[in-house]
Amino acid sequence: MATALNRWGPYTNMRSLAQLGPKIISRADGVYVYDDRGRQYIDGHGGLWLANVGYGRREIIDAIAQQAEALAWFPSFGGFANEPSLRLADRLVELMRVDGMAHVMFSNDGSEAVETALKIARQYWKALGRATKYKFITRRYAYHGVTMGALSVQGVTVNRIDFEPLLPGVIHVAAPYANHCSMHPDSSVCTFACARAVEDAILTQGADTVAAFIAEPVQAAGGVILPPADYLRQVREICRRHDVLFIADEVVTGFGRLGSWFGSRHYGIQPDIMTMAKGITSGYIPLGATAVSDRVFAAFLDSSVPGNPEFRHGNTYSGHPIAAAAALVNLDILEREQLPEHTREMGPILRKALQSVQTRHPQWVQDANAEGLLGRLELVDPTGKRKPGELGAAMAQHMYDLGVIVRPLGDIVTFSPPLIISEQQIVQMVAVTEEALMRVQAQS
Ligand SMILES: Cc1ncc(COP(=O)(O)O)c(C=O)c1O
């Protein structure tokens, strides 16, 4: 298929694509997407962990059109601004006050938001005259994006390996991962051991060399790895004790995904820096954002601090007026329809449904869980016939044939549907999952 190869697909095996051809999605509405033959699918993955308010929202489409007519674009460099991005910053700061955030810088996506956070952390310590604090601590299985800085703090080995050498001064520590934790299988011991691993890394490197620790509240692309209840609080405390900034990467967990507005709030912490993207516009148009506390911002404002307090960083499209206009209406919908609260109600329904699949297929399902509308079904092939990843890929294909789109990560089927999903649609999505599993079993 020559035309399929003209477009080099992201995270796509182009040899398979050449054989199979692309799956073309042509339109979408609510929780459903439709392919070019008109077939309907439940979008069990919200695009790529987003589509929080669902597809086809007339209000957002109109806001985009109106903003494009009034002012499609003008840069925000060097003192210029546009009204939607100023209003959005005010709105976000108001929303995140309880999370300790006070200022926002815009970018275009999650990778850029993370890149911005890393650079803020480095310059923050330089501005305070502590230039030796430049290292970053991150975790195994972490996904923070694809640009070289964001990739350097990734902990998904296959994503990193072909691009090394990456940024020097990045230290990886164990992630608390039920049933897989390299520190201890018992979650209460693992919480403590994995938090201690962060402290050990800080002490081994020397706190005077460490700028920041970065973490997703739930490690999404690593396999929807849910942290033990107290882990993030313990690490937050360790970072505070050693004067290390805590960056919460909320690109997936922000804007209601876990049943709270932000993952940090969900797990009871206040970070120093927060990164956002995806659910900030529900995907209607790209937008990233990096928020910081007053303490961090002060280093860039205070002319008495040594160094250059201007942050020489910014993307051409930082604060794009159309993206900001879309985000404002997206926030209106999340608030008006109380989607974080709805997600809190739907989460246990998704978890219970997935766990009932595990109960009926204990040999094939190693783990089933969900926090809010972020779910996982970890599969294992008891016949031992399949290579790692083949089971997940087979499940995703059967589910697609049966009308549900999900994302397999190795042999973990992950779920992240639009937050508007109903109980009945969750039940249907999980019924399809079980049917797909039975098809896999029949082929074994
Ligand atoms: C937690 C997290 N951070 C950052 C990113 C990178 O975002 P983007 O793909 O928009 O660059 C992702 C992408 O999935 C993510 O899951």
Image (cartoon, grey):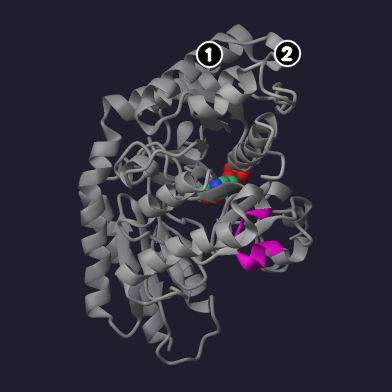
- The residue identified by callout 1 is 86
Of 68 and 149, nearer the camera is 149
Q: Position of residue 149 (x, y in %)?
A: 70, 48
Of 155 and 18, nearer the camera is 155
Stretch of the chain drawn in magenta: 152-160
Q: Is residue 9 left or right of residue 396?
A: right
Mark with earlier residue (1, 2)? 2
Assign the N terminus to one quadrant of the image: bottom right
Badge 1 density bin: few <14, some 14–19, many ≥20, Cα 10 Å: some
- Residue 284 against residue 319 in the figure, above or below: below
Q: Is residue 382 left or right of residue 434?
A: right
Residue 147 appears anywhere in the view: no
- The residue identified by callout 2 is 78
Residue at the location (55% across, 31% down)?
A: 289
Assign the C terminus to one quadrant of the image: bottom left
In the figure, residue 404 lies in which quadrant? bottom left
Q: Position of residue 59 (x, y in %)?
A: 41, 21
Residue at the location (44% across, 71% down)?
A: 395
Of 133 and 123, nearer the camera is 133
Name the kind of residue labelled 2 in the image: Gly
Q: Position of residue 103 (x, y in %)?
A: 51, 23
- Residue 279 against residue 242 in the figure, above or below: above
Of 403 and 325, nearer the camera is 325
